[in-house]
Amino acid sequence: MHSEMKAEVMPMSTKPLSRPAVWGLILGLLAIATIVASGIGYRLGGWHFTRGLQVSEWATYGAAVALVLSGLGLIQARPRAARRGLFIAVLGLLAALLPLGLAVQWEYAGRTTPPINDISTDTADAPVFWDMPNPTDYPGAKSAALQRAAYPDLAPLKLGLPPEQAFAQALSVAKHKGWSIIASVPAEGRIEATSSSLLYGFTDEVIVRVKAADGGSLVDVRSRSRLGRIDRGVNAKRTRDYMASLQARATADMPRP
């Protein structure tokens, strides 16, 4: 009985390993490592950010090859097939899908968001940066029209709090978001900060303006990118997220009737 069981087990262990599965995993992991290295290289000053993006593009092509190889390995190593390495093939698929997913998201955002990189909840009288390296004015009517068409929900936030309290809450939320506070001027109701992207560390500039209005406060936010002509919706997303968090914080602090 023991010899029969041994005879059944042996063929499984002697199956050749699927080479496409192995190479698919290697290329998938290499693609991830290359993308991470492209960001680190830019952060350390090894190359311009455009070169880093090119490196990421090459890594995406490698991930596409890894996906094909891992898919072939999955077929070769399926249950009762002639080769082994099913788990390796699955890992290769997952490793390849991560860079490809990021690339698809990046491309989709570039195609579905307007070609602007400066967002303001008040486009007629946008908050003015004073403590940033390049305190340029808001782009103007054309950018405002594109913003309104793409992000009609972005608007000033009215709070039923006195300006001093609203300013304190606005500053607290900015710090909670992990922004680096550059300037905090309560007398002017002005907060200037920067926010950096995870991989490349691209710096975006944010200004929050708090002023008295209708017995309460009116909060405006302007967020812009230092690099590039488009932001793929990042600044609008940041503004929307900040306003939602501030409103929730302010609502919780409102006095109960």
Image (cartoon, rainbow, N blue to C red):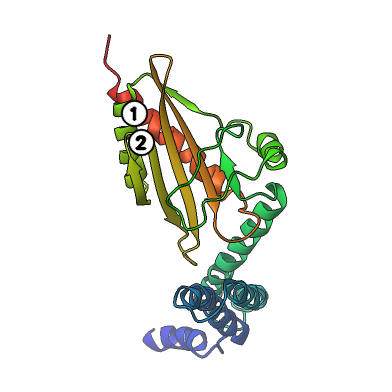
Q: Residue at x 70, y 50 (%)?
A: 115
| Circle 1/circle 2 CB separation < 8 Å | yes
Q: Which residue is the site of mark 2?
A: 170
Q: Residue at x 65, y 54 (%)?
A: 230
Position of 96 with respect to 46 (left or right) is right
Q: Residue at x 55, y 29 (%)?
A: 155
The C terminus lies in which quarter of the figure? top left
Whether residue 178 can be seen here? no
Residue 77 in the image, given as x and y percentages of width and height: 59, 77
Q: Residues within 10 Å of mark 1 (few under 14, many from 20)?
A: many
Position of 249 with respect to 155 (left or right) is left
> Could you say whether the residue bearing mark 1 is in a helix, strand or loop?
helix
The N terminus lies in which quarter of the figure? bottom left
Q: State the mark number for residue 7.
A: none
Position of 256 with respect to 34 (left or right) is left
Q: State the mark number for residue 166.
A: 1
Residue 162 in the image, given as x and y percentages of width and height: 32, 21
**Image quarter of residue 63:** bottom right
Whether residue 209 can be seen here? yes
Q: Is residue 174 or residue 187 the one in the foreground? A: 187
